[in-house]
Image (cartoon, rainbow, N blue to C red):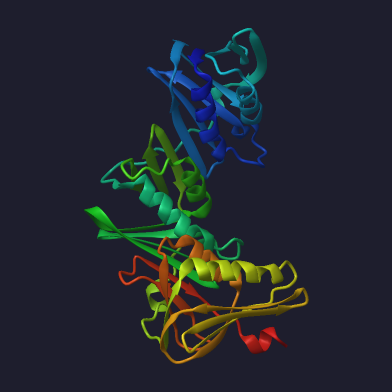
Amino acid sequence: MKIICSKASLTNGVNIVLKAVPTNTTMSILNCILVTAKDGFIKFTSTDGDLGIETKVEGVIAEEGVIAIDAKMFSEVVRKLPDIDVSIEADNNFAVKIKCGKLKFEINGQDGSGFTLLPNVEKNNPLVISQLTLKDIIRQTIFSIGLNDTNKVMSGIHFFINSNKLKCSSLDGHRISIRNVELKNNYEPLEAIVPGKALNEISKILNGGSEDEIEIYITKNHILFEFNDTTVVSRLIEGKFFDVNKMISTDYETKITVNKKELYECLDRSMLFSKEGNKKPVVVNIDNSILKIEVNSPLGSMDEEIDIEMQGRSVNIGFNPKFLSDALKAIDDEVIEMYLVNAKAPCYIKDEKDSYIYLVLPINLANANS
């Protein structure tokens, strides 16, 4: 095999597929990037068994072939190359020669025939959305997935498609994030739980253009994303997702309208007193069109007032400040609306169209202060 590529093309291709190279595996072949030069295309492929990425790399094929190259070594070599064209050549003994101007590297490769190829996913009726929309969906829901292994279902984002509506939900037992998106086309009902890891890596690859589309194919066991000459395939999480509709209520006793930036910055300051080992909640007191945030911990104390618009009765409620600030950070609106019932019921943050809904459970102040 022999290919010739620019340093920029190599760097881009390697950086994309590195995201699926496992950090800990006993299968040495999975530590590699598969380089395939065949049928007029140069492709880089990587997989950890659950997530697989393949991307096309611009270049010239001087000789067709396949070689598996250690991903860490390959990426380090490519990173240190000058910004000129690069020649990569592999012989029958799997020795890989990388030449760039007067610079030459030789590293050991492996037989590419032993590499696990990406699963073949049937491509019918793709879900088509803009890269910007998908990137926003991930950003606005990924932070509330469960991070432990006690319930695998919580470690993913639930995609539910029906007609021209896409609903993406995540939860971790303390909060719920929901994004509702209107689609250009109509679809038959379809749902899948997509691993948070896969979506997180996809978000890093997407360029986020509003005019750049991504095609998504969902089957029983896999989800496939195609965009920018790149294919990402992930196993789906098995199981039944929670019925978040039953967890969301429209009842409220108190509604406030507040400047998002002011509230976010106030919560951010309060977290100075909620370091590791100091899980003291913030106390949110809503009364007389004033929202007051207080925190007392062994590190010190703080209180701050924010002017708000208020409907309904006064309420005094405790929250984990990070859970509230995570939701605020994900919202792009300048002004937000929050809905509360009492000190023991969830707080909802949502817009009029329900394009986003965030639920945050309160902390019992009596227990927190005991």
Q: Tell me: 187 left or right of 94.
A: left
Q: Position of residue 172 (x, y in %)?
A: 54, 67
Q: Residue at x 56, y 81 (%)?
A: 292
Q: Tell me: 178 left or right of 181.
A: right
Q: Nearer the viewer, residue 356 or 1?
A: 356
Q: Quadrant of the C terminus?
A: bottom right
Q: Residue at x 69, y 68 (%)?
A: 272
Q: Position of residue 103 (x, y in %)?
A: 65, 11
Is residue 172 among the parts visible in the rendering? no
Q: Residue at x 54, y 67 (%)?
A: 264
* Marker count (numbered): 0
Is residue 11 among the parts visible in the rendering? yes
Q: Residue furthest bottom?
A: 313
Place residue 126 in its image quadrant: top left
Q: Residue furthest right?
A: 298
Q: Residue furthest left?
A: 186
Above/below status of 276 relative to 224: below
Q: Residue at x 46, y 36 (%)?
A: 118
Q: Tell me: 72 left or right of 12.
A: right
Q: Position of residue 90 (x, y in %)?
A: 57, 13
Place residue 256 in its image quadrant: bottom left
Q: Position of residue 283 (x, y in %)?
A: 61, 82
